[in-house]
């Protein structure tokens, strides 16, 4: 009986020791690079005519902290609504994001956090065969605010044109 108890204790300690050696999913520093975006936000931007619009964005970590979920609502009638999910892919050493919205949009991005900016980009081919690059740049990041730019390039990323800038302000108590 004592030999059996010693055997079970040895097995248990071996499993317990091995379990402590395995890092938790999404616990790498890179997996937390998008945490600056988590929270409740008030948004403001101008259209090309200078009209000011407002919106909100609710961003949270889900699925054990492995996924960043965004819920965007923008000004207009009807309101523009969208949702994204972002995850760090350690095999690629890149962030991946998928965006969908109430206008039938579906966009997929890949990117990284470097030089105090999160840059996610994608490319697609127009019906005329032109290759267009698009990117989102999160910068001027502080605990209470950040700036988000939507940019496009028709020359494979040599030059970029600003199409939309959103100023984020964290909701008080959010």
Image (cartoon, rainbow, N blue to C red):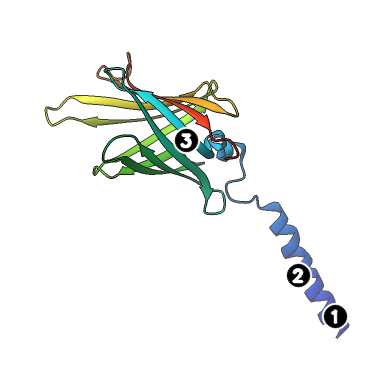
Asked which quadrant contains residue 122, the reply is top left
Mark 2 or mark 1, which is nearer to you? 2
Give the crowd class for mark 2: few <14, some 14-19, many >=20 residues within 10 Å.
few
Between 32 and 83, the one nearer to me in the picture: 83
Asked which quadrant contains residue 105, the reply is top left
On the image, the x and y values in percent for residue 161 come to 31, 16
Residue topped by disc 3: 94
Residue topped by disc 1: 3
Which residue is depicted at the point 52% across and 39% down?
A: 40
Q: Please identify the residue farthest to the right as the structure is shown.
A: 2
Instruction: Report if residue 93 is visible in the image.
Output: no
On the image, the x and y values in percent for residue 57 come to 44, 38
Q: Secondary structure at mark 2?
A: helix
Which residue is depicted at the point 31% across and 27% down?
A: 134
On the image, the x and y values in percent for residue 120 come to 41, 30
Structural distance between the alpha carbons of marks 3 and 1: 50 Å
Quadrant of the drawing holding the N terminus: bottom right
Vertical comparison of 11 with 24: above or below: below
Structural distance between the alpha carbons of marks 3 and 2: 38 Å
Between 31 and 36, the one nearer to me in the picture: 36
Mark 3 or mark 2, which is nearer to you? 3
Residue topped by disc 2: 11
Give the crowd class for mark 3: few <14, some 14-19, many >=20 residues within 10 Å.
some
Which residue is depicted at the point 75% across and 59% down?
A: 17
User: Which mark identifies residue 38?
Assistant: none
Mark 3 or mark 1, which is nearer to you? 3
Structural distance between the alpha carbons of marks 2 and 1: 12 Å
């Amino acid at each position: 009986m004592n030999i059996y108890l010693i055997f079970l204790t040895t097995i248990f300690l071996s499993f317990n020791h091995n379990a402590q050696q395995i890092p938790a999913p999404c616990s790498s520093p890179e997996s937390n690079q998008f945490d600056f975006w988590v929270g409740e936000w008030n948004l403001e931007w101008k259209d090309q005519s200078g009209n000011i619009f407002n919106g909100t964005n609710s961003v949270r970590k889900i699925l054990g902290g492995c996924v960043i979920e965004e819920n965007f609502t923008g000004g207009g009638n009807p309101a523009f609504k969208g949702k994204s999910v972002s995850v760090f892919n350690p095999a690629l050493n890149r962030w991946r994001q998928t965006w969908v919205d109430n206008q039938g949009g579906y966009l997929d991005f890949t990117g990284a956090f470097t030089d105090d900016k999160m840059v996610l980009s994608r490319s697609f081919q127009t019906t005329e065969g032109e290759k267009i690059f698009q990117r989102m740049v999160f910068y001027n990041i502080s605990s209470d605010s950040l700036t988000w730019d939507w940019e496009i390039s028709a020359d494979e990323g040599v030059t970029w044109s600003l199409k939309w800038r959103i100023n984020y302000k964290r909701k008080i108590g959010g």
